C-alpha cells in the first residue's frame, strides 16, 4: 500500500508450519496501525484475528490502545495454552506509524524484521 509518502510491503513464508499467519493494517486520521502475528495454532490465529477486528471497530489508534490489544492477545494465548498439552508458540508485531512525522513506534515479540529503504537499516 502507498500511504502519504510511505510504501508498505509485507512478506512471510506461508505454509512452513502448522498454525497461522496474519497481517493487517488500518488507518485513522494521520496514523496507521500494523499487526502481524504468527502462531502454532489455528485457534490462536483465529482468536487474534477476532481481537484485531474488535480493535479496528473501536477506531482508536494510540500507544494505550496498542498496549490493551497486546494484553488481550496475551490473555487469549494464556487461555488457549492452559488447555493444550503442547505449548503454544506465538509471535506478535504491532506498531503505529504517524504519517505526519513518519515516526514509528511499536512492539515486537518474536522474529520479525523491519526494513527501511531510506535509512538502510534493519530493526
Image (tube, rainbow, N blue to C red):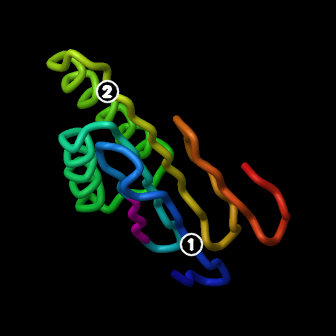
Q: Is residue 92 above or below residue 119?
A: above
Q: Residue furthest left?
A: 83
Q: Which residues are magenta?
A: 23-27
Q: Viewed as shown, does residue 26 lie left or right of 102?
A: left
Q: Viewed as shown, does residue 121 lie left or right of 41?
A: right
Could you say whether the residue bearing mark 2 is in a helix, strand or loop? loop
Q: Nearer the viewer, mark 1 or mark 2?
A: 2
Horizontal and vertical percent position of residue 75: 27, 26
The numbered mark, 1 or 2, whose residue comes first in the sequence reads 1
Horizontal and vertical percent position of residue 19: 29, 44
Q: Is residue 53 above or below residue 26?
A: above
Could you say whether the residue bearing mark 1 is in a helix, strand or loop? loop
Horizontal and vertical percent position of residue 110: 53, 36
Q: Which residue is mark 1?
A: 9
Instruction: Report the disc number at residue 88.
Output: 2
Query: Are there few (<14), some (14-19), or many (20+) residues within 10 Å of tag 2?
Result: some
Q: Is residue 28 above or below residue 4?
A: above
User: Is residue 87 on the magenta stretch?
Assistant: no
Main SS of residues in magenta: strand
Residue 80, by quadrant, is: top left
Horizontal and vertical percent position of residue 102: 69, 67
Question: At 35% from the left edge and 40% from the top edge, which residue is drawn?
Answer: 39
Question: At 82% from the left edge and 71% from the top edge, which residue is drawn?
Answer: 118
Amino acid at each position: 500500500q502507498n500511504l502519504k509518502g510511505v510504501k508498505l510491503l509485507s512478506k512471510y513464508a506461508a505454509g512452513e508450519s502448522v498454525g497461522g499467519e496474519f497481517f493487517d493494517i488500518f488507518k485513522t486520521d494521520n496514523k496507521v496501525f500494523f499487526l502481524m502475528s504468527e502462531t502454532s495454532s489455528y485457534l490462536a490465529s483465529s482468536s487474534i484475528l477476532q481481537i484485531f477486528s474488535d480493535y479496528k471497530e473501536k477506531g482508536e489508534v494510540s500507544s494505550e490502545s496498542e498496549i490493551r490489544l497486546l494484553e488481550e492477545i496475551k490473555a487469549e494465548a494464556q487461555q488457549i495454552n492452559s488447555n493444550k498439552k503442547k505449548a503454544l508458540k506465538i509471535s506478535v508485531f504491532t506498531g503505529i506509524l504517524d504519517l505526519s512525522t513518519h515516526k514509528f513506534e511499536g512492539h515486537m515479540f518474536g522474529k520479525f524484521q523491519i526494513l527501511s529503504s531510506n535509512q538502510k537499516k534493519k530493526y
